[in-house]
Amino acid sequence: MLIAQLSDLHIVDRSSGAEAEREATSALRAALARVTAFSPTPDLVLLTGDLTNNGTPGEYRILAGLLESLELPHLLVAGNHDEREALIAEFGGSSVLPVDSGPIRYTHGLEGLRIVVADTTVPGRHDGAMDEENLAWLDATLAADPSTPTLIAMHHPPFATGIWWMDQAGLIEGMEGFAAVVAAHPQVVRIVSGHVHRAITGRTGGVEASVCPSIGRQVHLDLAVEAPPAFTHEAPALQLHVWNGSEFITHTTQVELPGGLVHPDYGDPQKVLERL
């Protein structure tokens, strides 16, 4: 089974400027084209938050129009830049967002795998939280199906990344409680998130947790204390999570491959391997 993950789309409308709108929509079109071109075809596409930049109805209308071309099953996760009411007004009650009120949390079944979408957002804030009510929901939701391998999708990573200014806007509340809930449910096999605009891996509750880079701009990797916040011109990227029945294998790939592909003409595959 193959799950594609796109994160931090930050779709804007013309009120943010024509160039900003063009850049964001072009980035999503390119990412969707990359996903649909994969072979085998992904079974599901997860879009893990910051779907829009300002959470306006106009931005969600643009997003809906762009996603019309995506014929693959896909699910939406809320991020700190999203506005629950506007997001639900555009997508709520549909297969991509099966809720009609906040918090934006739900489950989705695949063959032999369960997706649990958690809502780490706090209205009006950029940092995230898993308060007692959200933790209780997650605990009960996981307890309802203890035998099916489960992937949890969320926006804020459930661990500190070491990039201080992003961690200050990370999962500030409930990180330890989240880890305890995960540890109590051994069917949880992976946690996926976004928010940090970089590919990062960590662990929480004994489970591997990954962060998907943005399909837009990336955060500069600087682990120095109090390093000035910065973005880079690193290429937009997405992730592919391969479920082999017992574990997830994750690949990170650029949205657009510079220079195309090079196929070594050595005839014997062993000779190709010798060059690597």
Image: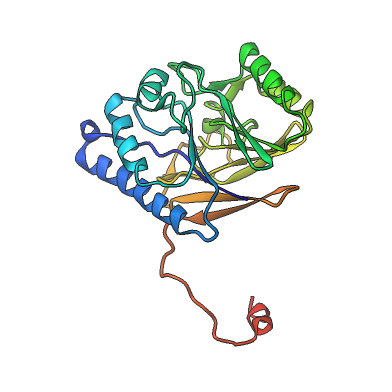
Colouring style: rainbow
Q: Is residue 158 left or right of residue 87?
A: right
The answer to whether any part of residue 162 appears in the image is: no
Reply above or below: 226 against 271: above
Q: Position of residue 242 (x, y in %)?
A: 63, 51
- Identify the residue at the far front of this view: 111
Q: Position of residue 103 (x, y in %)?
A: 51, 18
Q: Nearer the viewer, residue 53 or 225?
A: 53
Q: Position of residue 30 (x, y in %)?
A: 37, 53
- Identify the residue at the far top of this view: 133
Looking at the image, which residue is at 61% across and 16% down?
A: 134
Q: Is residue 146 left or right of residue 169?
A: right
Q: Nearer the viewer, residue 193 or 223?
A: 193
Reply above or below: 34 against 10: below
Q: Position of residue 49 (x, y in %)?
A: 47, 33
Q: Nearer the viewer, residue 96 or 181?
A: 96
Image mark count = 0
Looking at the image, which residue is at 54% across and 26% down?
A: 168
Looking at the image, which residue is at 21% across and 31% down?
A: 15
The answer to whether any part of residue 194 appears in the image is: yes
Q: Is residue 53 left or right of residue 46?
A: left
Q: Nearer the viewer, residue 37 or 129?
A: 37
Q: Quadrant of residue 161?
A: top right
Q: Quadrant of the C terminus?
A: bottom right
Reply above or below: 253 against 74: below
